[in-house]
Amino acid sequence: MLETEFLGRRLPTPFFIPSGIVGDVSRLQELDLSWCGLFVTKTITLHPRGGNEGIRVWDLPCGMLNSIGLANEGVEAFVRETLPKLASLEMEVLVSFSVYSEEEIPGFEGLFAQGLWAVELNLSCPNVQHGARGLIAQDPSLSHRLVRAVRRALHKDTALIVKLSPDVPFIEDVAEAVISAGASALTIANTFPGVAVDVNRGRFVFERVVAGMSGPAIHPIVLHRIWRVRSRVLDVPILGVGGVWNRDSALAMAMAGADLVGIGSALYHDPAVGSRIAREVEEFLQRQECTWTEVVGKAYGDI
Ligand SMILES: Cc1cc2nc3c(=O)[nH]c(=O)nc-3n(C[C@H](O)[C@H](O)[C@H](O)COP(=O)(O)O)c2cc1C
């Protein structure tokens, strides 16, 4: 009942682990993944990155802040060491990567030559062009250029999924810009910027002050971003992610237009949350006598 089709693949469930939630892939062996249809890797960059100094995660009553700083082994080591380990997983794997500029794209040739069915381009990288401020994903024309250049470098059979930042006024403009550049699907969304103060130390918690907010607090705002995109763009699959923590938040995301639903930070608090959501959503579908596909976009009525 949970089976669904996504970009020509049959997935056993519409639920996925979003990028960065399980960074160390050897940990996957310890987890119950029967609920999960798709695993997205930690974002890799051209060069290895040590990540940010100081505190990296901060718990909040309504979610968490993280400042990992895209710590990763770099694309070469990823292709050599991590990718072979992922091949033994009994589920679809989506490799997430980020580029700071078009000049970096040739450095990913080794990854693109692996015959991957799809990749996820994380556009929430600082925009380094001409000393600009903000993220690449906050600039529709730059996002368009980068996606077009990545699309050209990819094998024609590799689908390009683009992960957007929710921290933009008109996310539908960025969505249209990347779709016209060749994106096959959109992931909505990455974390929001947030700041925490450690009152006992009288200092900002994070060395870089600003961190990424995830968890239940962002859920309605991410639904708003999905709604904005879905109301304008009807025919591109959406991977919804942001603050899903129980059955109803997962169903709400699907009804707002997400074809697949990610479960991220909630797994830190309760590793069993994924299997519980999958079981309860399945029971819901059985009671309502409908399929997952019928639930996707249901909130819009007949449009
Ligand atoms: C600790 C941590 C690390 C993350 N690392 C990445 C990353 O490397 N790449 C990425 O695209 N998103 C990353 N994210 C964002 C998540 O993939 C997801 O978009 C976000 O957490 C919202 O979903 P959630 O509220 O279910 O956690 C990270 C999130 C967390 C909490």
Image (cartoon, rainbow, N blue to C red):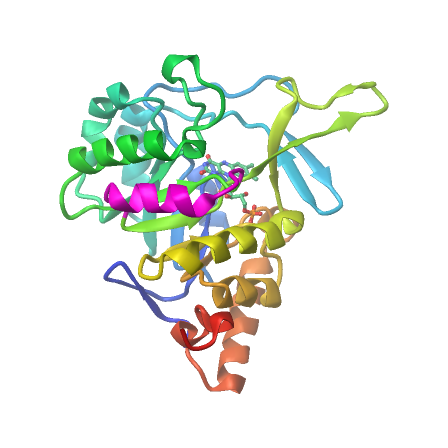
Q: Nearer the viewer, residue 72 or 162?
A: 162
Q: Residue furthest right?
A: 200
Image coords of residue 241 (percent x, y)? 50, 51
Q: Nearer the viewer, residue 271 or 242?
A: 242
Q: Quadrant of residue 223?
A: bottom right
Q: Is residue 35 above or below residue 110?
A: below
Q: Is residue 255 left or right of residue 91?
A: right
- Residue under the point 59% across and 62% down: 249
Image coords of residue 181 (percent x, y)? 25, 41
- Residue under the point 22% across and 49% down: 117
The N terminus, quarter of image: bottom left
Q: Is residue 251 magenta?
A: no
Question: From which residue to which does the magenta span run?
Answer: 167-183
Q: Is residue 175 magenta?
A: yes
Q: Is residue 161 left or right of residue 188?
A: left
- Residue under the point 45% across and 63% down: 257
Q: Is residue 110 above or below residue 245?
A: above
- Residue under the point 34% across and 26% down: 99
